Amino acid sequence: HGVAGILAVQGAFAEHAAMLDRLGAPWKLLRAAEDFDDAIDRIILPGGESTTQGKLLRSTGLFEPIAAHIADGKPVFGTCAGMILLAERLDNDPNVYFGALDATVRRNAYGRQLGSFSTTEDITTFGADGVPSGTISDFPLVFIRGPFVAEVGPRAHVMCKTNSNVVAIQQGRILATAFHPEITSDTMMHKFFLTL
Ligand code: GLN
């Protein structure tokens, strides 16, 4: 295994690092373009504020190497704001960031009451061929003003729904969740990400 690069310009990056520590997986925080090196074989885009993260991705010079990593088909895992950064289409925001995930995402669409809640669901994982490869059972879903998935295109696969809303998506080696697996004690989503 190589090293997981965790975008650390803003948001919940420390929680992802703690999760990888529990799995014994090496990681490195990405704060500046120089932090990106050849040892990095996968990237985590944490929750936070996507607009701020987008600006900092540009000003640090991290946008280009991360975009190239994704374009090469290498693994990337976006949680919450990270899902927004990955989406090809945002329907209430003029920005598009990495534009890699075949989905339309709406920011802050659940409103104040529904925006933050917890529940439990099964999650389907997919193989490289897009065929279901397994199930992560009873995974805790914690939402903090998470994005609403308005539409999933044909290149992407729904891993999980709750209340009939899509909340986790896989597209090859791209994983995106509207919830925050890194702030739970369940390591299964990160463990799956490390297999990609
Ligand atoms: N509301 C945030 C955004 O639009 C995402 C929330 C989160 O990452 N917890 O960027």
Image: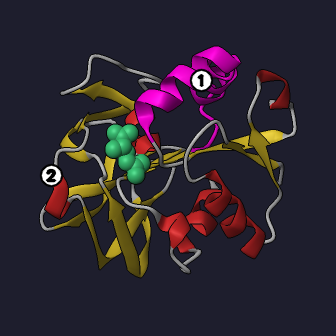
Compared with 29, 91 (above or below) is: above
User: Quick one: 20 or 50, which is closer to the camera?
Assistant: 50
Instruction: Residue at 43%, 34% (x, y): give it.
Output: 50
Instruction: Return the disc, 1 or 2, that comes first in the chain's sequence.
Output: 1
The dot on residue 4 is none
Q: Which residue is mark 1?
A: 57
Q: Which residue is mark 2?
A: 111
Q: Is mark 1 within 8 Å of ligand 1?
A: no
Q: Which residue is outermost to the front?
A: 112
Q: Is residue 130 visible?
A: no
Tell me the amino acid under the disc marked 2.
Gly
Compared with 120, 48 (above or below) is: above
Left or right, 32 with reference to 155: right
The residue segment tinted magenta is 49-76
User: Quick one: 154 or 151, which is closer to the camera?
Assistant: 151
Number of marks in the rendered image: 2
